[in-house]
Amino acid sequence: MQALVIVGHGSHLNPGSSKPTFSHADTIRETGVFDEVREAFWKEEPSFREVLRTLESDEVYVVPLFVSEGYFTEQVIPRELRLEGWDVSAWDSEDGVSADHATLKASDVEKTVHYCGPAGTHDSMSDVIVRRAESIAGDPDVGEGFGLAIVGHGTERNENSANAIHYHTERIRDSGRFDEVKALFMDEEPEVDDVTDFFESPDVVVVPLFIADGFHTQEDIPEDMGLTEDYRTGYEVPAEVAGHRIWYSGAVGTEPLMADVLLERAAEAGADVSGAPDGEREPGAGVAGD
Amino acid sequence: MNAPQLDAFVSSASAGIEFDDLTVSPTDDRYRAEIPGDRLETDEKGLRKFAEENPWYVSNWYYWTRAVGPAGARYAFLRWIERADERPVGERYEALSTGVSRSWGQLRITASLGEDGKRRYALRHVDDENSTGLESYSDPLAARELVKHDDRGRYRPLSTAPTLPTGWEYPDLSGDDLVRTVDFVYPATVENWHREREGELDVTHFREAAERQSGIYSIVSQLSVEELEAAAETCCVDSHCLKRRQWDEDEETALDVERGSGEFPCREPCSLFITAARKFVTLGREDTRSYEFDLTPTEKEQIEEIIDAVAEGRTDEIREADLNEGANRYRARYLRARRLEDGELSGTPTYPDDQA
Ligand code: SF4
């Protein structure tokens, strides 16, 4: 038997924070490729500490629904799951965006745990960002005449968070699909506040590389960009800002295609996902061409 | 009992069966079968007849060993629900025919007999035991959203807080789905309860859990034992959490705070506790100061009553016009109008030195 555990941050304050984890778990459950699929959270239950014992499977694939490598994926999750002998070098990721997977034992259960890199740094995440741009623009061919801004939190505790943003920015830029692709941040330069300064294209799709919608994506970013004075009054999509049309999408982590990224992470770590439908992906639209 | 159950029974008989009150053992090319009050030696035909005359014993054996098995947390939990280890099969089936109920936190679980001796389980809030017109569900996954907010619409960050919403029911679950649903309502409780019954509950005491914390949480290890007691009394008593606290300061040092009377154990400080503890450490670091206030004796008492009402979550129960209650809203507003000049009690500055 094989199980998939999707681990997310969760929140003591915001009930919406665990929603993307639930919905991607449900999508994967429906494929039927795992005997068990379970969600676990840092701030909600089941906690990382207890999730493994609720499973019957001996082979467990753990995929963090996090944006980047760093404090959570390298320290908190492996420690809380009691992964014996974990060392971040097992992921072989010096640039902070190349984590793959490591196979370990958890000390409180008799199970083999395949611990995968975070969803946010997987190559196919670039496709999810593009898909998000398509759906917010309502155009499956969106690109020409459009700029794309990928927004990250910026510094905090996590030195790698910007790396993930830059990584996908470069990949999508290299694909040549959009006229311009830029990385912007909430808490460091270049800042999302000045979004229109960074683009010549009249239309700019803004995709925050966040897992869940919350204060940042629903309140701070729309206000910072000048889409609205007060997030409670809402805003148009697209909204006019300084001569540009801003197409704002909310957290990319809520995009249904994310389920495919999680599945791919598990498959690369050895999970048997044969029989899974090809998901929502249209390889033609993608960036992750392999 | 149905035909497949009967066939499974007969084909297992040659390897011997011993389950609940039923024993079958092969003897040469015959069988010895026994239930309370009846015992015979017979051939296969006779064994079939015996089974047909005692269908409960066969379906009971089939349900537990084929439908539910293997033994483990789920098995033990479902057995516990129908008190399988306390009652002989006959008595149990009689009870199941009208339904056997057990409480699990604020859940009420009722087991009854389904087709061919299988069980069906109903699940609802304990307070809804006699309610009608409940919203009916069948998908265990729905429970995740169902229990996310309390009856007042507030988000429930702690799944075992005694604020489970009412008004819903799962009228007909299989054993598997019952356990999954319970796991969505009270995650990992069945598993930890089972480990505890088996004498294998792995408890992580506070000091050890605190040592493990990193980043902004590493300061929780500075909580003094007095502060830890206050924190446990704040978070872990029945009025706030239905888990029975099994962790202490460390292996040698038990906390004086009551553990709670819940059915399922708490094996280590939860994330909400750690978050609260972090706040308590920073609160505890502040030095006290002396302030001088002018309050009437009744006003002083009123402040005490307000703190108590908020801490106990009683503010909603205080009637709008009950002016004798210190925590009544009119009383509180009047106190504020009279005594909170610029938001400071009796006009006394919080940081008098800093203002100089
Ligand atoms: S630590 Fe306290 S509040 Fe948290 S689950 Fe255990 S008993 Fe409940």
Image: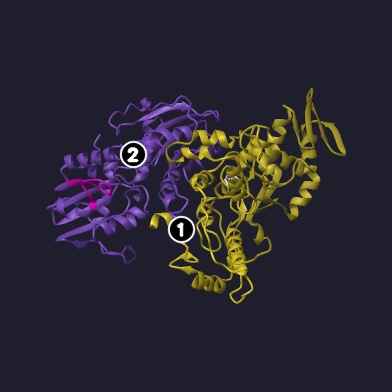
**Of helix, strand and loop, which one carries label 2?**
loop
In the rendered structure, which amino acid carries the disc numbered 1? Answer: Thr
Write down the residue under mark 1: B350
- The image quarter in which residue B214 lies: top left
Which residue appears at 40% of the width and 27% of the height?
Answer: A102
Which residue appears at 59% of the width and 56% of the height?
Answer: B164
Q: Nearer the viewer, residue B124 or B213?
A: B213
- Residue B266 in picture, x, y percent from top left: 61, 42
Quadrant in which ligand 1 is drawn:
top right
The image's mark for residue B62 is: none
Write down the residue under mark 2: A158
Give the chain letter for purple: A
Q: Nearer the viewer, mark 2 or mark 1?
A: 1
Label count reads 2
In the rendered structure, which amino acid carries the disc numbered 2? Answer: Asn
Are the residues under badges 2 and 1 in a single subunit? no
- Residue B86 in picture, x, y percent from top left: 78, 42
The quarter of the picture where the C terminus of chain B appears is bottom left
Left or right position of A139 against B301: left
- Residue B46 in picture, x, y percent from top left: 80, 35
The quarter of the picture where the N terminus of chain B appears is top right
Q: Chain of mark 2?
A: A
Q: Nearer the viewer, residue A187 or A100?
A: A187
- The image quarter in which residue B22 lies: top right
Which stretch is magenta?
A: A181-192
Which residue appears at 33% of the width and 53% of the height?
Answer: A216
Residue found farthest to the front: B356
Give the chain letter for yellow: B
Cβ–Cβ under 8 Å for marks 2 and 1: no
